[in-house]
Image (cartoon, grey):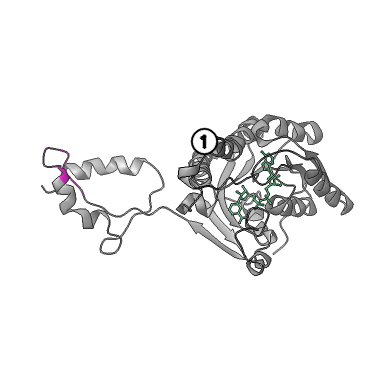
Amino acid sequence: MSELRYDNQVVVITGAGAGLGRAYALFFASRGAKVVVNDLGGSGKGEGNDTKPADAVVSEIRSAGGVAVADHHSVTSGDLIIETAIKNFGRIDVLINNAGILRDVSFRNMAQRDWDLIMEVHVKGAYKCTRAAWPYFRKQKYGRVINTSSASGLFGNFGQTNYAAAKFALVGFTETVALEGKKYNIQANVLAPGAGSRLTATVMTPEVLAAMSPVYVVPLVAVLVHSSNTETGSIFEAAAGTFSKIRWERSKGALFRPDDSFTAGAVVRMWEEIGDFEKEKPEHPSGSADMIAKLEEAKKAPR
Ligand code: NAD
């Protein structure tokens, strides 16, 4: 198979001064794309700023013969980041919302700032960048978006109520922009990555860190944002060479007639059926409409 290329495309990557974002930036530049390397350059907890991380990645790309510009805005000013792409390259084809910070603390001890800053960077940041890119995507009938979630968002993780909530918000956001973007050939997918980086350095052993190079996540992103991709509104995990897809599963459940026989006691009696994934074949819902279709079935349910 020939290598995937991105010639004449403009790729904007947020938080590309380090970790996963840097790996994406180097890859796309090496495959012909013009890259906007955005990074605020603050601490892992989101304090301060520094132009060096983004500038260093741009120098690395340019010395390898690639094309890139640095952008030092926070993702909360996503419109200015997209403006950097338009001013320098006249278009935007791919947006990888990747910038991220952590402010881990038990829920009991969480300060308002821990909650707000995480929501600002992850949720508002992805929203602002995508919102600013949207008119360009629609006009040219082409756009590719990756939103970066996390296993913490999908499954929860101790000490990360703020981060998990933000990362799960990005799932609903992506599923919905994927629906709204479909007729304009705008695709959006969720990535829950795993990689050794500043964010994970304190929780992973040196051996695990070494085995989980950010470079191992790149191929999946490369496929998802390529013009040949047809996948949209999906959730993927990628780490250390493992790529997989996540989907929703709903138990067949119990049907109750929507009348006065529909009591809490009836729910208790059917508890096993409600939570059963083995005896009856589960469903894999992909939208809200099929739940409404169940109403008709429920009307005929035995009392
Ligand atoms: P990293 O710290 O190496 O890189 C994140 C980059 O984002 C940093 O360079 C940082 O300066 C930048 N950034 C932070 N706030 C910003 C802002 N407001 N505006 C612009 N840039 C900003 O971390 P990483 O591990 O490469 O993480 C990348 C993304 O992947 C994050 O969204 C993170 O939550 C997510 N993630 C990572 C892992 C993992 O195992 N590394 C797991 C799950 C999710």
Q: Residues within 10 Å of mark 1 (few under 14, many from 20)?
A: some
Q: Main secondary structure of the magenta part?
A: loop
- Name the foreground residue: 53 vs 26: 53
Q: Is residue 137 visible?
A: yes
Q: Furthest residue to the bottom?
A: 207
Q: Is residue 34 left or right of residue 147?
A: right
Q: Position of residue 145 (x, y in %)?
A: 61, 43
Rendered location of residue 70, percent (x, y): 80, 40
Q: Nearer the viewer, residue 277 or 103?
A: 103
Highlighted range, magenta: 255-264
Q: Residue at x 77, y 53 (%)?
A: 26
Q: In this orientation, which residue lies closer to the viewer: 191 or 47?
A: 47
Give the vertical position of 286 relative to 245 (above or below). above
Q: Quadrant of residue 55?
A: top right
For the image shown, how many numbered marks are present on the structure?
1
Taking the magenta stretch, the answer to whether it contains residue 258 is: yes
Residue identified by numbered label 1: 180
- Indicate the amino acid at tag 1: Glu
Percent x, y of residue 104: 55, 48
Image side of residue 109 versus residue 130, left or right: left
Between 147 and 232, the residue placed more toward the observer is 147
Whether 84 is drawn above or below 254: the answer is above
Q: Is residue 8 visible?
A: no
Q: Position of residue 71 (x, y in %)?
A: 77, 37
Q: Quadrant of residue 210?
A: bottom right
Judged from the image, the secondary structure of the residue bearing numbered disc 1 is: helix
User: Is 247 covered by the magenta stretch?
Assistant: no
- Of the 4 image quadrants, the one containing the N terminus is bottom right
